Image (cartoon, grey):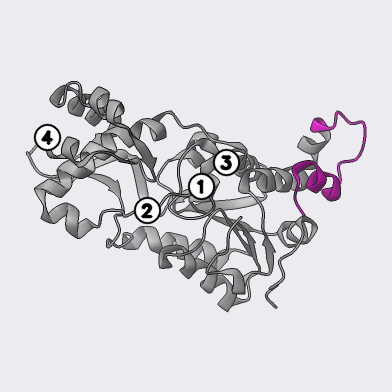
Amino acid sequence: MSPNDDGGTLQQAIEQLRDRAVVVLTGAGISTDSGIPAYRGPGSRPSNPITVQEYMGSEQARRRYWARNHLGWRRVKWAVPNEGHQALAELERGGAVRAVITQNVDRLHEDSGSENVVDLHGRVDQIICTECGDLLRRRTLEEILTSLNPGFVERAEALGVVEAPDADAQIDDSLAREFVVAPCPRCGGVLKPDFVFFGENVPKPRLARALKLVDEAEVLLVAGTSLTVMSGLRFVRQAAKAGTPVVLVNQGPTRGDEFATVRLHSGTSETLRAVADALLPRRSAGRSHGAERVTVEGLAAEQGIR
């Protein structure tokens, strides 16, 4: 395998993906079209995410976190899968994609119908007690926090709220200082979102499952991630070391560009939709009403992909 430093075309990507066991790695870029902000990339705002050490070591840090999360969660709660998520679900149902490994915690892959998904960093819709291990639905916690903090949302919105990744939000610090944090309803322990914080390791069984999927893949499709953190980059390096082709789709530069067999500088929604239409011909024919044969070149032109 020789890396394609100059990028590539949709046609070249399709040639790598066709009739092969494809495993997909996704990042925040696939969910931006669903209205969920990303940490990095075009249009992203500067962000300073909390570490697990800060969260567990400071009651005030937890107040600040949950005040912001209580506001930021609303965007994630109402987010719906976009064309990129739907395309991958269709590719799985059609047998063209074996599994999805996602660095996202928004569960939009599952909501779109994908079944074989590894939520590498966990899930935002679930809360875990760090002491007794009890699990709580995020929607249930929302009700508890609302009752403990009457009028908080209205005061925050009056002062201004800026959405941030992972159900976070930027707000006035004075609001965070007064926020009442909910303890575990079962044991009174510290509650934490059931996803991996910065400074925290991916659980070993989950990581092992993802590594095995990449090891068995005949091609790795990477979509919507800058691969800045090692938790995602390791899979690209693993594939490249094994000689497995890597098709990389992202609008901005990534740390994995040097390992890409084909590198598409394009958005994930339009590219994954074009890939699905090319690899699942019956659906493509339906989209054109049988009037003409759908070609990869035509799909690229339709979606604005080079």
Q: Which residues are magenta?
A: 286-306
**Label 1 sits on residue:** 116
Q: On the picture, is 250 further left or further right than 148?
A: right
**Label 3 sits on residue:** 85
Q: Which mark is residue 121?
A: 2
Q: Nearer the viewer, mark 3 or mark 4?
A: 4
Residue 271 showing in the rendered view:
yes
Q: Amino acid at mark 2?
A: His
**Label 4 sits on residue:** 178
* Sequence-earlier tag: 1 or 2: 1
Image-quadrant location for residue 82? top right
Quadrant in which the C terminus is drawn: bottom right
In three-dimensional space, the C-alpha distance between marks 3 and 1, rounded to whole angstroms, equals: 13 Å
Residue drawn at 18 percent across, 52 percent down: 55
Q: Nearer the viewer, residue 265 or 177?
A: 177
Q: Residues within 10 Å of mark 2 (few under 14, many from 20)?
A: many
Image-quadrant location for residue 128? top left
Q: Nearer the viewer, residue 180 or 118?
A: 180
